[in-house]
Amino acid sequence: MPTPPEQPVPSRIVVCRDCCCGTPKVPGVDHARQTARLAENAPVRISDCLGVCEHANVIVVQPSAAGRAAGARPVWLGLVNDPDATEDILTWVRSGGPGVAPCPDILDLYTFTPPGRTTPKPGTTASRPEG
């Protein structure tokens, strides 16, 4: 039986859902719906606390294999607390994500550098969560 062709590794999304992110500490957000919506469109990993609670809800967009080959690193997004921001992230991920598609200007409002890391322009060589 022939081996099926390998599919390219897509952008992946890490969603913090621990002590602050995804809890009643961030009111007015349907956290379960946000996570489900992201998972409808990309591989999603739920993370324990990423240590940047002041930015709750935190989402990290990890580049695809093609994005990594282009030198991209994960992009950290904070205060992702409304459905429009979630949709903006999904639009970017569907178009290729970091290193493949330019980061939409609107997401610059959410991009931050986690402590102990240095981050150039989103989608280029941003820092990444371990794992």
Image (cartoon, rainbow, N blue to C red):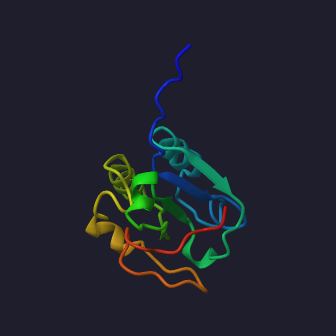
Residue at coordinates 57% horizontally, 62% vertically from top-left? Answer: 27
Q: Position of residue 22 (x, y in %)?
A: 63, 58
Farthest residue to the top: give it: 1
Q: Position of residue 101 (x, y in %)?
A: 29, 58
Residue at coordinates 53% horizontally, 62% vertically from top-left? Answer: 59
Residue at coordinates 42% horizontally, 67% vertically from top-left? Answer: 72
Quadrant in which residue 131 is drawn: bottom right
Q: Toward the viewer: 12 or 40?
A: 12
Q: Is residue 92 left or right of residue 86?
A: left
Q: Is residue 130 left or right of residue 38?
A: right
Q: Is residue 92 left or right of residue 29?
A: left
Residue at coordinates 46% horizontally, 36% vertically from top-left? Answer: 7
| Above or below, comparing residue 71 to residue 87 in the picture | below
Q: Position of residue 11 (x, y in %)?
A: 46, 51
Which quadrant of the rendered structure holds the N terminus?
top right
Q: How many numbered marks does the figure carry?
A: 0
| Above or below, comparing residue 129 to residue 8 in the picture | below
Farthest residue to the front: give it: 2
Q: Position of residue 4 (x, y in %)?
A: 50, 24
